[in-house]
Amino acid sequence: MTGATPVFCDINPHTFNLDPDSLKEQVERVLREGTLTPKAVIPVDLFGEPAEFPRIEEICREYHLLLMEDAAQGFGGAIQGKRACCFGDVSATSFFPAKVLGCYGDGGAIFTDDEEMYQKLLSIRVHGKGSDKYENIRLGLNARLDTVQAAILLPKLRALDEEITVRNRMAARYSEQLEGIVEPQAVLDGYFSSFGYYTVQARDGAHRDAIMKELKEQGIPTMIYYPIPLHLQKVYEPLGYQKGDLPVCEALCERVFSLPMHGYLTQEQVDFICDTIKSL
């Protein structure tokens, strides 16, 4: 929408997050080719775990790139005690109902410690307003969080830490019960996941299909959130990406799926789900 051209990077096969090595390779490739000018990096905090920001921040400083944290799924996660939404120059999170902190409709928040950017964001949020909402000084959006959604979020925010504790306890139970059957998203040392989703790798597509089919027959929901890699989406066909360009990402899209995860999940429910999988 801004006229920028996205350049996609591959991901870590265990965390599913942006691979800093791939990021550095792509930045250097773009610089060598000379057609585009690297401007910004947007790492995603996937399924509740922050991206590898200590390394990514070093790369962004080296190449003078703006760093924007996509913490839509990262809220509640942390690195060495530093919470998601604190990394980079600006970050954003989502309050969509499926997220760790969800309202009953659409919502989100942006975080920055840059006063100038903060003032611009306030303007963009309300149609690009100037001194008041009837003066427009830039192109903007109608992007206000409505009062009803805010009222829903406030009590849920107070309960969030307890819910994340439950999510982590149930994630540990899943991992213990399913060891050797599926591989869960790895949480790096010093990292903390809010486990917005509990996502695992099956051995291959056929194994995933068999597990999901059996769970469905038992009334247990599962989900494949990203069946098509972003670089192979139709909207980006003009960029010329082909299958095989980001092999780790493509392989994971064929194997990963998510099991039930929320702040009120019980040990008995997790055990039932795991027993169903182990019965195959």
Image (tube, rainbow, N blue to C red):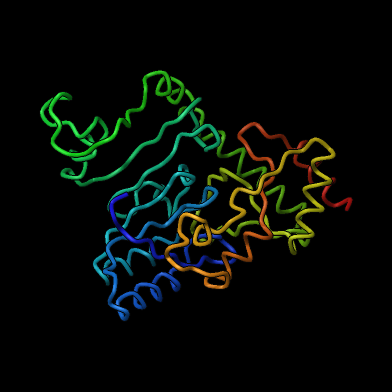
Q: How many labels sit on residues?
A: 0
Question: x, y percentage for residue 252?
Answer: 63, 62
Question: x, y percentage for residue 77?
Answer: 48, 47
Residue at x 45%, y 42% (from the top left corner): 75
Residue in front for this viewpoint, 188 or 209: 209
268 vs 189: above or below: above
Rendering quarter of residue 150: top left
Furthest residue in direction left, as rendered: 131
Rendering quarter of residue 58: bottom left
Residue in front for this viewpoint, 84 or 201: 201
Residue 214 horizontal side relative to residue 257, left or right: right
Residue 113 horizontal side relative to residue 169, left or right: left
Question: x, y percentage for residue 34?
Answer: 28, 77
Rendering quarter of residue 166: top right
Question: x, y percentage for residue 173?
Answer: 71, 47
Residue in front for this viewpoint, 245 or 242: 242
257 vs 242: above or below: above
Furthest residue in direction right, as rendered: 279
20 vs 200: above or below: below
Residue in front for this viewpoint, 13 or 50: 13
Residue at x 74%, y 60% (from the top left corner): 205
Residue at x 53%, y 61% (from the top left corner): 232
Residue 110 horizontal side relative to residue 210, left or right: left
Furthest residue in direction front, as rendered: 238
214 vs 106: above or below: below
Residue 268 horizontal side relative to residue 128, left or right: right
